[in-house]
Structure formats: C-alpha cells, structure tokens
Amino acid sequence: MIVMDLEWNRGYDSKPIDEILQIGAVRTDESGAIRDTFSVFVSPAIHKKFDRGARGLPDLEDSKSSDISFPEAWGMFEAWRGEDNEYAFWGVGDFEAVRQNCAYYGLCFTEPSAVYDYQSAFSHALGQGGQQAALWRVIDYLGVPDVFTYHNALNDAMYTALVGSWLGEAAKYIKPESDDPKRKREKFCTEPYTAAKGKRVGPFASTEDCLNSRVARSPACPVCGKSFWIRQWHTTDSVRFFGTGSCPDHGKFIARLTIDPETLLGRLAVPELDPTAIYEYRRVCRRGTTHVCASLHKGGRRRFARRRRAG
Ligand SMILES: [Zn+2]
C-alpha cells in the first residue's frame, strides 16, 4: 500500500489547480507497518502567489528552493512506487490534486487498483458517519506522540499510515454509494438555470450577525424560487462565504455570501453550478474556516470552529 500525502498551493489566480509543492509517501506492508518512505519538494511553476494555507507550510522554503519540476518529481515517485498500485490518503482532496497536476502537465497517470480514504474509514470505525476529523485530532485521540511537524507531506503520510495500521482491516472501508432516491437532494442540481443577480442583505451589526441572519441563510432555488436553508458557511478570507443548501425538488445549490467588512452589507447569490464553482466551493471547504450558524430556536447557540487542513 502506498500511503500518500501532498502539500499544495491554490494561489489566487483563475487557474483552477492545486499546485503540488511536496509529494510525501510511505509504503506499508500487510500488517500496516511502514517499510519505506519517499519525499520530494517541487519547485512552484503555476501560481504566482501562495495562498494562506501554503504560506503556513512549515517547509515552504524547501519547495521554493527546489529545482525539481512536477514532471520530474512525479517520475521519481513513479520509479519509487514500482508495482504497488493501491493508494491510501487522508480525505479525498489529495487524490484529486494528483489527477489535476498530472493532467496539467499531460503526464500519464496509472489508474490505481484501489484508493482508500483513511479519514472516512476512521470516522466509520468510530460510528461517526459524516464527521471528518482532522489528522492531528485523530493522532491526538489515538495517543500517538506527535513528534513530527504537521503539513509536511512525508510526516502527514506517516501519521496517516499509523492511523491505517491502527484501523487494521477497517482501513479498507469504502463508503457505499447511496441509491436512495431521497438522496437526490444531496446531489448538485443538474437542471439548467440562469443565475440571478445577487440580492442585498443587511447591513448588520457584525459579520457574525450577517452569517446567522435568517435572510442571508435562506436563498431561493434558482429553478423554482422556493427558499432553502444554509446551516454553515465556509471561508478562506472572511469576506466571501460559501454554503450549500437543497431544494427538495431540484437538489443542492451553492450559496455565496459576500460581506463588505466596512459597511457590513451582504450580497447573497446562487451562482451557476459549473465545474469551477463546485471546485471553488470544495476547495474553500477543505482549506477554510467553518462558521456553524447559530440556531434560531435554541437561544442563539454559537460555535466558531477553526478547521485545520487535514493534509
Ligand atoms: Zn427548486
């Protein structure tokens, strides 16, 4: 099994790609023990600027000073990987980044025989279906001394492999695809529609009040006009917030709430669901901070959860 982790940079430009800055991997045997390790820092070549997540990487300087391009780094990884063709990751984002980077450089990517997500496997093993815990939390939970710095791809791959070894057979859990028709609402809307101009909301006393407000949390389905409900917002810059909600008849939509920090006026929009919008939404979910909206019925319970990057 190849347990892999990547560090990457999304940048701030319009090229929708998580540019890989480091490839880290370990090879594990049947028992889950680590047998071999791999790490390479990649010289950044796509985005001009580093996003906030990338700027926080402990070993960013090693990528900046690297003279190894992604195609070279990938070739080194492929040579190290050899015949092993089963992969494990923490979460599903990194595997997507591999695909993107290989596609960007026109590299042939050998389709893995299996891809496991130890993050889902872990939450399944603990009976917490939907919860996706950050790697450092799980390592903490397992009582593993975290002697290596997180957000170094090799270290995170080692930690991921440790969780896999703890899970044993349960590490090979595959989330079942649901065929329940009620789950239709879980899928993004597939009907064509024209995105309406955003509507103004507020001004509010604070950004938090705006995020919690009934009006900002109930955008209209762009197909039928019925309003749907947003429960949480994700952001990487505290100006643009993204959430999803579902119309029972037309499926899931993305809502974008932009709050001007000066005037505290909000603009609420339901953008078109093109691949870039969905990609952007998933990226913010993965990288950003989550604001769980205060309940309107239970005396305004509030929670501001800082989500750390899982890897
Ligand atoms: Zn609808």
Image (spheres, rainbow, N blue to C red):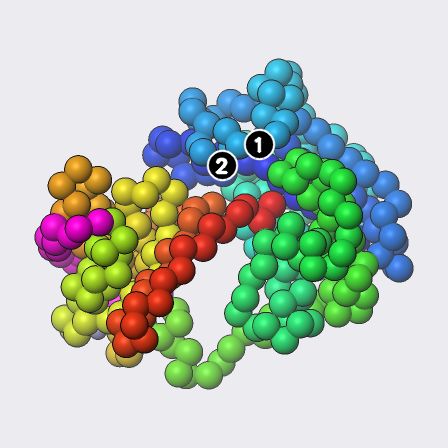
Give residue 252's quadrant in the image.
bottom left
Give residue 40's quadrant in the image.
top right
- Look at 45% across and 33% down and name the residue there: 52
- Look at 82% across and 46% down and name the residue there: 27
Q: Nearer the viewer, residue 23 or 242?
A: 242
Label 2 element class? helix
Quadrant placement of the C terminus: top right
**Magenta: main secondary structure:** loop
Query: Quick one: label 2, few (<14), some, or many (20+) residues within 10 Å?
Result: some
| Image mark for residue 57 | 1
The kind of residue on which mark 1 rests is Leu
Query: Quick one: label 1, few (<14), some, or many (20+) residues within 10 Å?
Result: some
| Image mark for residue 232 | none
Q: In what quadrant does ligand 1 lie? A: bottom left
The kind of residue on which mark 2 rests is Gly
- Look at 26% across and 56% down and name the residue there: 211
Horizontal arrangement in the rendering, residue 73 relative to residue 304 (left or right): right
User: What's drawn in magenta, residue-wise?
Assistant: 188-206
What separation in Å lies between label 2 and label 1 (alpha carbons)?
7 Å
Marks 2 and 1 close (CB-CB < 8 Å): yes
- Residue 279 is at least partly visible in this image: no
Determine if the magenta segment contains residue 208. no
- Look at 63% across and 27% down and name the residue there: 59
Residue 253 image offset from top left, x and y in percent: 29, 63
Residue 140 image offset from top left, x and y in percent: 69, 54
Residue 6 image offset from top left, x and y in percent: 62, 40
Q: Which residue is mark 2?
A: 53
Label 1 element class? loop
Is the CB of mark 1 within 8 Å of ligand 1? Answer: no
